[in-house]
Image (tube, helix red, strand yellow):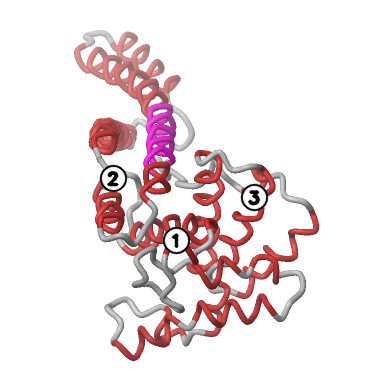
Amino acid sequence: MSNEFNFYDKTNLKSYNLDESMRYQLDMLDRLDVFTRRHCENVANLTCRLCEYLHCNKSFTEYCTICAYLHDIGKQFIPPEVLQKPGKLTDEEYAIMKTHTTIGYDICMKDLKLRPYAAGTIYHHEALNGSGYPRGLTKKDIPYEGQIIRVADEYDAIVSKRQYKSHIGISDTLKILIENCQAGKSNPLIVKKLFKVVIDDVEYEIYCTQKYVDELQEELKRFEQIEKYREKMENAKKEKDKNYYYEGMKMLLKNNETIDNYFSIYEEYKNAYKKRKAMIDNLYKEIKIIKKLKV
């Protein structure tokens, strides 16, 4: 009955056609905790697709994607009680958290194979208006890859923090990014392209969910037929007719379904169908909202 939608499934590592020599850089992620690793993968996926919508060339896209994979590599040295704290960080804890940028930069600069991608670690929290860290740089000093990764990182961080399991309500996250653009922190063009990436994902989620709904619909038809046979069996006067409909019910059952439990399974399918149909409706509403957003 489970039909979990994988937010980033269609943009996996293979889609980048990365050279084998780059596997070393990506293997660095094995040192991270599972949540940070997942975040780094998500940010890299988003960064790659943002580069495509920004019409960046292939070499820059690959370079930027690797930078994004490594952007939080410094978090391996942040104490777990700070890194994984569920609530708001204290000022002291936040100061410790911010050091992941410089720690990551030092890790990259000391390794010849990582050095070319150090920009991802040091620039992804810089803001165009100078309010970011660790250096408080302004637009003219923040390289393009840093500006792109900042948007991807910010988006995924908010989504992960809110623990969204689908794109329903995702327009609220985009509104936060719009506010940051208005405050002069993020590049408006990059955020606009993020809208396109998100719409692609929402449409893909609708496609996947609709496929599951179609499958459920076929199963519901089967259960409806079983119910018809049951009604006829109960209303039949002759024993042979009762047996005929009983056998018909049994022929329509699948897997672990039985005459005794099929109705509860039928109810599960109906509930799943109703839930997924409502999800699709909400996803279409989200697309309409996103398309009306202005940066």
Q: Is residue 113 left or right of residue 52?
A: right
Please state which amino acid type lies under the numbered disc 1: Arg
Q: CA distance from mark 1 to mark 2?
A: 16 Å
Query: Tag count in the figure?
Result: 3
Q: Residue 89 at x, y = what percent?
A: 30, 82
**Residue 225 quadrant:** top left
Q: Is residue 268 above or below residue 38?
A: above
Q: Residue 47 at x, y = what percent?
A: 52, 51
- Badge 3: residue crowd in 10 Å (few <14, some 14–19, many ≥20): few
Q: Residue 116 at x, y = what percent?
A: 70, 66
Q: Which residues are magenta?
A: 195-212
Which image quarter is the N terminus in? top left
**Mark 2 touches mark 3? (CB < 8 Å):** no
The numbered mark at residue 150 is: 1
- Badge 1: residue crowd in 10 Å (few <14, some 14–19, many ≥20): many
Which residue occupies the extreme bottom position in the image? 92
Q: CA distance from mark 3 to mark 1?
A: 16 Å
Name the one closer to the observer, 138 or 5.
Answer: 138
Q: Residue 75 at x, y = what percent?
A: 52, 78
Report the magenta stretch's main SS: helix
The residue at 66%/50% (across/down) is 62
Q: State which mark lies toward you, 1 or 2.
A: 2
Please state which amino acid type lies under the numbered disc 2: Val
In primary-sequence order, the first of circles 3 and 1 is 3
Name the one closer to the observer, 176 or 235.
Answer: 176
Tell me the element at label 2: loop
Q: Is residue 149 left or right of residue 104?
A: left
Q: Is residue 249 left or right of residue 24?
A: left
Q: Which residue is mark 3?
A: 60
Q: Which residue is mark 2?
A: 295
Name the one closer to the observer, 167 or 199.
Answer: 199
Which image quarter is the C terminus in? top left
